[in-house]
Image (cartoon, rainbow, N blue to C red):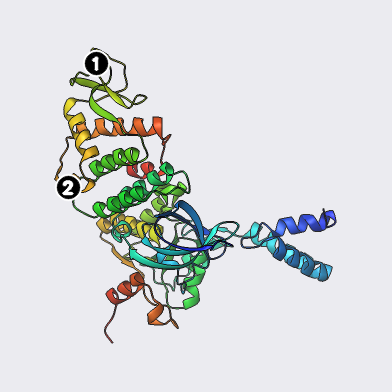
Amino acid sequence: MADRTFKTDALVLLSRPLGEADRLITLLTWERGKISAVARGARKTKSKLAAGVDLFTYGQYILYQGRGLATITGQQVKEHFQYFRGDVALYPFGLYLAELTGKAISGEEPCRPVCHLLLEGWRLLGEDLDRELLCRAFELKLADLLGYRPNLNGCFLCGSPETAWFNQAHGSLTCKQCGGGGVRVAPDTVALAVRLLEAPLRQVRLLRALSRQKEELAGLTGSFLKYHLEIDSLRSLRFFRD
Amino acid sequence: MIFPQPLQALVESLCRFPGIGPKTAQRMAFFLLGLSREEVVGIARAMVEAKDKLRFCSSCGCLTEEEPCRYCSDQSRIQNVLCVVQEPRDVFVLERTGQYRGLYHVLHGALSPLDGIGPEELRLPLLFKRISRQGITEVIIATNPNVEGDATAAYLARMIKPMGVKVTRIAFGLPVGGDLEYADDLTLSRALEGRREM
């Protein structure tokens, strides 16, 4: 019989109360992708698991895979991302990255690059940088890692560098002459999107954007994610508005 | 169906209790069948009466039989200190300690956007009204020490502090009877932060 116990690094994407004193956890694991697991007794004050099964935790987990849901039998916290708990302005950003990643990863599939991306995203959110821009860079990179890289190098119909629209269905830009509709994006926004897509995520520290550029970027990435990954109406977005 | 219909219906009803699976529900059902009729009626009546007679206090949101609740109407309690908790049962847990003599306010939840709980779903307008009208000088936030509870506490602190009211958070630390070596890093670091002089 195959060994049912395994050890993996993971990020906690979701943590919900279950039954009397348990927690149902959604983990993004290095080895097996997104899995759900039960942390028995994790809501009791003396539980050994309690501190490691809260949202925004990066740790090493020992899991037992029975016939149903996996059970967490041990954990060692590596990072806690305390700032999401104490800063109500940061909380929705961390939550957004977690929810977006959770929606984009459909199930048990190895996704180490996505794990690293989310880990870096959570770490960078604790720094003094433009968090909206970080979210846009995260969205573009996440789509890229999942095989949906937008083509931001000129009009996809005629090759003209003078583009005006982003067509979410084609994941490409179009110029004024070719038309085609979609989301309107100015050339300086396209240049910014290219930088966000190609440069390491931490480079967001060095970037600044006008509010108009941020709006256009949000339109570009939002429509792209909605069309290709069917990610729409995330609950964490409502918290941004509130 | 293995059981006669009334027994099957009882087992299914008991299964609706949190943490009760089919096996436990069957054990409970057979236990109930072993009781006298009067005892079963007593249990059923207690459940119906609790459901019928208890409601949430319009002021603090605690479970109560009378309006306002005994905590809100008790003038011997400290009237300018308010303890904010997540659920009505938390009031009884704090009361059990016998250490707190102020007023309560129950939020009926904690901020949890992923569960669709935002500020509008909590009893926040009433809290702010009470703080300003009842001359509250200190608000103790006793939400659960998890991400949702901490985010709610941070949100409340941000909203209440500008009203010129002292906002405090219950301390975090090691459980009584626990061993230091089994404590996690976060609990230990919070316990160190919250240390006090002896």
Q: CA distance from mark 1 to mark 2?
A: 35 Å
Where is residue A195? Give x, y as percent. Answer: 19, 37
Crowding at mark 2 (Cα within 10 Å: few <14, some 14-19, many 20+): some
Task: Kindly identify the residue that appears in the image at 29 percent across and 41 percent down.
Answer: A141
Q: Upstream in the sequence, badge 1 or badge 2?
A: 1
Q: Dot 1: within a 10 Å radius of its alpha carbon, few (fewer than 14), some, or many (20 or more) residues?
A: few
Q: Quadrant of the N terminus of chain A?
A: bottom right
Q: Residue at x 50, y 71 (%)?
A: B93
Q: Which residue is mark 1?
A: A158
- In percent of width and height, residue A163 lies at 21, 21
| A51 vs A74, nearest the viewer | A74
Q: Position of residue B101 (x, y in %)?
A: 42, 74
> Disc 1 vs disc 2: Cβ atoms closer than 8 Å?
no
Rendered residue at 36%/41% (across/down):
A237
| Image quadrant assignment for residue B99 | bottom left
Residue lying at 34% horizontally and 72% vertically, measured from the top left: B185
Identified by mark 1, the residue type is Cys
* Residue A205, disc: 2
| Residue A129 visible, this angle | yes
Residue B144 seen from this side: no
The residue most toward the right is B4
Disc number at residue B178?
Answer: none
Q: Is residue A39 above or below residue A226?
A: below
Which of the pair A203/A212 is nearer the observer?
A203
Amino acid under disc 2: Arg
SS category of the residue bearing label 1: loop
Query: Chain under label 2?
Result: A
**B96 and A43: which one is in front?**
A43
**Residue A158 vs residue A230: left or right?**
left
Q: Secondary structure at mark 2?
A: helix
Give the image location of residue B152, x and y in percent. Answer: 37, 57
> Which quadrant of the structure image shows residue A228?
top left
